[in-house]
Image (spheres, helix red, strand yellow):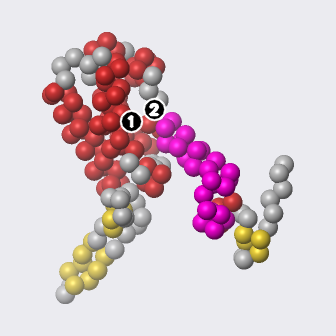
Amino acid sequence: MICQLRDVALKLDFDLHGGVTFDNKLKFDKHINNKINTAYQMLGIVKRNFIYLTPDSFVVLYNAIIRSHLEYAVSVWNPHHQSLIEKLEKVQKRATKLVINVKKLHYEERLRRLKLPTLKYRRIRGDMIELYKIFAGKYDNNTTEWITGKCIDGAVRTISSA
């Protein structure tokens, strides 16, 4: 939001409850960049404190300390621009190089050996799970009826199973 205060334009960022920030154009670029920076900081902590990581110990540390920052509230700010998707994936690419056994392998092979999916895959999978929950009625129907199409202009409509 931009406010005018004595001929000075102020640009405001919004912060949702839960720490997700967006700008006046409803873009999450600043939030995503902050999350990427935090994940790199956590990666640095892991790198400085663990000299040798086995694949199993790496996966536990990565999931708890690094990936959690990259995926917090991702259903709200899921990136659609390729540059942001690549920046997020780059964190995982760099992190997987901490495991000496797989350091010299290509990224896709490192992921296979560590049994990790790409971050993009996890975001798509999470979206699919949420859609299933919505359409299977796992959430309050009053909240989700606009998505499922069960209520249009106040009239209840039945969805035939095809």
Q: Is residue 106 above or below residue 14?
A: above
Q: Is residue 145 above or below residue 97?
A: below
Kind of residue indicated by mark 2: Thr
Name the disc covering residue 118, or none: 2
Q: Is residue 41 above or below residue 152?
A: above
Name the disc covering residue 79, or none: none
- In the rendered image, residue 64 lying in the magenta stretch gets the answer no
- In the rendered image, residue 144 lying in the magenta stretch gets the answer yes
Position of residue 63 measured from the top left corner of the image (x, y, whole percent): 36, 33
Q: Quadrant of residue 68?
A: top left
Sequence-first tag of 1 and 2 = 1
Kind of residue indicated by mark 1: Glu
Q: Quadrant where the N terminus lies?
A: bottom left
In the rendered structure, the answer to whether residue 90 lies left or right of residue 4 reads right
For the residues labelled 1 and 2, say whether their Cβ atoms are less than 8 Å apart. yes
Give the residues drawn in magenta, as a range: 121-145
In the rendered structure, the answer to whether residue 91 lies left or right of residue 142 reads left
Callout 1 secondary element: helix
Position of residue 150 measured from the top left corner of the image (x, y, whole percent): 73, 65
Name the disc covering residue 89, or none: 1
Callout 2 secondary element: loop
In the rendered structure, the answer to whether residue 105 lies left or right of residue 11 reads right
Q: Residue at x 79, y 67 (%)?
A: 157
How crowded is the residue under tag 1: few (<14 C-alpha within 10 Å), some, or many (20+)? some
Position of residue 84 measured from the top left corner of the image (x, y, whole percent): 39, 45
Q: Nearer the viewer, residue 7 or 37?
A: 37
Majority secondary structure in the magenta region = helix
Q: Residue at x 60, y 66 (%)?
A: 143
Distance of mark 1 from mark 2, alpha carbons?
Answer: 7 Å
Q: Residue furthest bottom?
A: 6
